[in-house]
């Protein structure tokens, strides 16, 4: 089972992607994690990626596709993979398909997680992170027992600089410009499914399971 999970920032791709991958015994591929692992392991592609990152530049599409290719042909990926947040645009989607074709692979499900900008703003601007252990809370959905203090380790909570309304609004604009066209690219594919991601985490997970199986 090979799955693509995509949608706007804050829609829950990371959280749900990990759960889905575990459920189906496939590897979870989030681009940030993939890049960090390659850099840490000092692979050939990892060193090339580090050079871009150290220079403050975006890692090229060819390099990212190469990193994905390395993982999906490894032994632990023989049951399949879930791509979390990639591709981000039509050019990447086209390059991904070409790479998969070379290996005789295909995408079984492309799942779009949908939510309104208003819901996403509420989610992201309410996020709080523990400065000590990294555990996350939410002002509205999962607030800490004591305001400003982590339930787990009593560390102080903070809001990430990129979780302000101004920054998030800009990220959503970039998403609409670059990533939303993937709906047209994948929308007519028989593998495509759309899931309402506005409801609670458990409900969304149930909807995702149906989308994968159905």
Image (cartoon, rainbow, N blue to C red):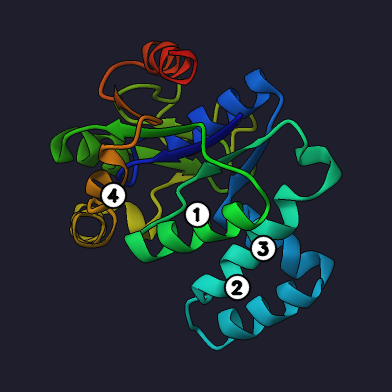
Q: Can you identify the residue that label 3 sits on?
A: 67
Q: Tag 4's secondary structure? A: helix
- Within 10 Å of disc 4 (Cα), the crowding (few <14, some 14-19, many 20+) is few
Left or right? Give the position of 200 relative to 76. left
Query: Is label 3 in contact with label 2 (beta carbons under 8 Å)?
Result: yes
Vertical position of residue 183 compared to residue 67: above or below: above
Image x and y of residue 170, in percent: 20, 61
Furthest residue in direction bottom, as rendered: 55
- The answer to which image quadrant residue 169 occupies is bottom left
Marks 4 and 2: which is nearer the front?
4
Residue at figure coordinates x 51%, y 32% from the top left: 108
Q: Can you identify the residue that label 4 sits on?
A: 185
106 or 42, nearer to the observer: 106
Marks 3 and 1: which is nearer the front?
1
Give me the disc on residue 97: 1
Residue at figure coordinates x 65%, y 66% from the top left: 66
Vertical position of residue 53 compared to residue 123: above or below: below
Q: Can you identify the residue that label 2 sits on?
A: 63
177 or 36, nearer to the observer: 177
Q: Earlier in the sequence, mark 3 or mark 1?
A: 3
């Amino acid at each position: 089972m090979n799955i693509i999970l995509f949608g706007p920032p804050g829609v829950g791709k990371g959280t749900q992607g990990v759960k889905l991958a575990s459920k189906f015994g496939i590897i979870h591929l989030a681009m940030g994690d993939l890049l960090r692992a390659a850099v840490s392991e000092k692979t050939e592609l990892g060193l090339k990626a580090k050079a871009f990152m150290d220079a403050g530049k975006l890692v090229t599409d060819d390099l990212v596709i190469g990193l994905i290719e390395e993982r999906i042909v490894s032994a632990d990926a023989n049951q399949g993979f879930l791509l979390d947040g990639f591709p981000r645009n039509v050019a990447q989607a086209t390059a991904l398909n070409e790479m998969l074709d070379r290996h005789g692979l295909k995408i079984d499900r492309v799942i779009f997680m949908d939510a309104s900008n208003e819901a996403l703003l509420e989610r992201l601007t309410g996020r709080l992170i523990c400065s000590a252990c990294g555990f996350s809370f939410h002002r509205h959905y999962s607030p800490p027992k004591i305001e400003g203090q982590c339930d787990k380790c009593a560390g102080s909570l903070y809001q990430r600089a990129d979780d302000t309304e101004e920054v998030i609004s800009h990220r959503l604009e970039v998403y609409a410009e670059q990533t939303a066209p993937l709906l047209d690219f994948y929308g007519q594919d028989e593998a495509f499914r759309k899931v309402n991601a506005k409801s609670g985490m458990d409900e969304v997970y149930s909807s995702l399971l149906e989308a994968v199986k159905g």
